[in-house]
Amino acid sequence: MLKIRLFRTGRKKQPFYKIVVTNKNNPPSSGRLVDDLGFYNPITKEYRVNEESLKGWIEKGAQISDTAYNLFVEKGLIKGEKRNNVSITQKRKTKIEERKAKEKEESAKEDVEEKKEAKGEKEEETSQPVDETQDRQVQGAEEKEEAKGKAEDDSAEKEGVKEEEPQEEDKEKAQDSEKETKGEKEEEKKEKTEEKKEKESGKEESSQEKEEDKKE
């Protein structure tokens, strides 16, 4: 069975590939080439392919290797999708699966942490308005209490002034009444002394009259 594949030539770290047709059982290094279709330089990205002979070999049933097929698709020589030509060992597969599982776990942890942070931020945002309303309520209550205290103080001062005014009036009335009582007492005393004087004068007159009667 024939196969279209790439045959590596060139120096170390300077690859150069020939596009050849060989028997599937014979490797290209054996030198048993059926046909030389062109070349491909991966460093300079230069390539040359005999399209007519390529189509002819494909019509004859020659198979194309995955690397050559992807190159032809990339250059537009064949229509189709690229093939997955990377062969992975079982050990490498297990390592890749383990790495993917770790990445999933880490991403899940990050998602959980982000959700927690988002919840914390929302709680803070919701708590801040509550705190502000509480502060406003406390301030309003304090202002009301201060206003009540001021009103009570003002009313107490007014009542004290009113109480003082009646007390002063009562004192003045008491003083006036005392003065009146003192004046009345003094007048009574004067009247009594005058009465006594009149009585004494009357007695003297009566005694004088008696003495005159005796003399007569």
Image: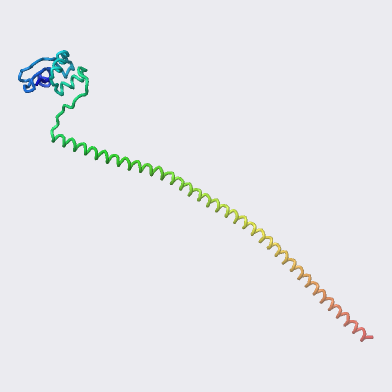
* Residue shown at 86% from the left, 79% from the top: 202
- Residue 40, quarter of the rendered image: top left
Where is 83 relative to 206, above or below?
above
Q: x and y percent of residue 65 in the render? A: 14, 23
- Residue 113, quarter of the rendered image: top left
State the count of labels: 0
Q: x and y percent of residue 54 in the render? A: 15, 15
Compare residues 162 and 186 and report the one nearer the observer: 162
Q: Is residue 109 left or right of residue 94?
A: right
| Colour scheme | rainbow
* Residue shown at 13% from the left, 35% from the top: 90
Where is 64 relative to 176, above or below?
above
Res. 14 visible in picture: no
Q: Is residue 145 left or right of residue 204?
A: left
Location of the C terminus by quadrant is: bottom right
Q: Is residue 142 left or right of residue 123?
A: right
Res. 151 visible in picture: yes
* Residue shown at 88% from the left, 81% from the top: 206
- Residue 161, quarter of the rendered image: bottom right
Compare residues 184 and 29 and report the one nearer the observer: 29
Of all residues, the one furthest to the front in this rendering is 60
Location of the N terminus by quadrant is: top left
Q: Is residue 134 left or right of residue 180?
A: left
Compare residues 61 and 175 and report the one nearer the observer: 61
Compare residues 199 and 43 and report the one nearer the observer: 43
Q: x and y percent of residue 52 in the render? A: 16, 13
